[in-house]
Amino acid sequence: MTIYLNNRIIELDKLDSYTPADDYEHATISFIGEWLNQSATFYLKTSGSTSAPKTIEIGRAQMEASARATIKALQLKSGDRALICINTSMIGGKMMLVRALIEGLNAYIVPPSSDPFKSIPDHFEFDFTAIVPLQLETILSNAESTARLNKLKAIIVGGAAVSESLQARLQTLTVPIYSTYGMTETVSHIALKLLNGPHRSDYYKVLEGIETKLDSRGCLEIKGAITNHQWITTNDLVQFHSEKEFTWIGRIDNVINSGGIKLQIESIEGKINKLLKQHGILGNFFLTKAADTKLGEALAFYYEGPETLKEPILQIFKKELPKYEVPRYFIVCKSFHYTASGKIDKLKTASDYK
């Protein structure tokens, strides 16, 4: 296998002689070194997009099991070319490195950017990559980058939800693009959902070797080699359609009790996403709960865009959403905060724009 880091070849047997140029190179080289030195335990940070970040301990065997499940599901093989363009300090980037190292994939590693192809010479072609929705949006806005992306064999996209408008744009591509379901605690994803093509699906399909069930709340529980054969209980409400297929409904802690009416944030976000798309309104947004003296809890809508769109969007909501789903608070933000893995940092953003 051959590994490129920022257009330079990294010789695995000479890692000690390589001087990292920046923090990203340092994190990447350090992890590769730990892996090659047969480290049994790794300490990973959760993203912190909806709660305080924390450090968790993950075993080598768990990471190997996760990597092999993905390799088998996507039919990757030694010699395939992997583009690693997400943060290697986070679980998604680390697992891209692990997949390359255990399967012998040729890896081309670059720091995260909105369009990684712009920094990569044209003669480099790839078979597999993992990206976040923001990168996918940007790539699809550039014809040359889109053409390069469409030559791949498989793409996984995670870190944040894929909007309906983005899914619609994916239907022009022939490369299979999979949405991922998982978290740091499950060592990256445990299920994949095909987003485009004639066989696209509304369901996540659980990877081989992973057991799932529902707890008394209707939330997903997961067990397998990736969890060290211990059951992990999530706060994700799901609906099973077969033993290995499920629909993600939303997080149970994202249910707002607003004046006695229970509101599922993800469900309302889906409706809003459709409305904004129909009216040609761009910009990222999210919903969260806010304390309210009258209702106890109320919906707060955060929008990343110009202030001039506040009133038009509000009128759309009032006209086309049920009264109780119209956000009580509307906050326009010049720019959101984002985590290292590309998710909207809802806690930090909400804190800055109270």
Image (cartoon, rainbow, N blue to C red):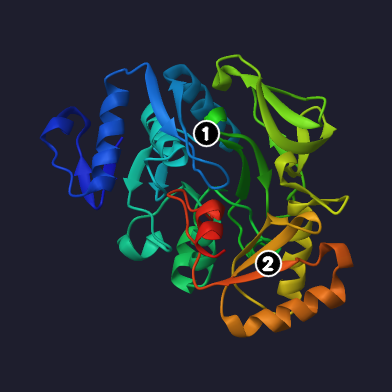
Residue 150 visible to an observer of this rendering: no
Counting from the top left corner in percent of width and height, residue 7 is at 24, 53
Depth check: 278 or 123 in front?
278
Residue picked out by circle 1: 184
Counting from the top left corner in percent of width and height, residue 178 is at 62, 47
**Eyeballing the image, is 292 above or below 46?**
below
Residue pictured at 72% horizontal, 78% vertical: 313
**Residue farthest toward the left in the current orientation of the protein:** 17
Where does the N terminus fall, quadrant-wise?
top left
Residue picked out by circle 2: 165
Q: Amino acid at mark 2?
A: Ser
Q: Secondary structure at mark 2?
A: helix
Counting from the top left corner in percent of width and height, residue 347 is at 54, 52
**Eyeballing the image, is 227 above or below 26?**
above
Where does the C terminus fall, quadrant-wise?
bottom right
Residue pictured at 73% horizontal, 50% vertical: 200
**Eyeballing the image, is 135 above or below 334?**
above
Per the model, the C-alpha gap separating discs 1 and 2 is 27 Å
Count up the numbered dots.
2
Residue 318 visible to an observer of this rendering: yes
Q: Amino acid at mark 1?
A: Thr
Horizontal side of residue 282 vs 353, given as left or right: right
Horizontal side of residue 118 vs 180, given as left or right: left
Q: Residues within 10 Å of mark 1 (few under 14, many from 20)?
A: some
Q: Residues within 10 Å of mark 2 (few under 14, many from 20)?
A: some
Counting from the top left corner in percent of width and height, residue 223 is at 65, 20
In the rendered structure, which disc, 1 or 2, sits on the residue that comes first in sequence? 2
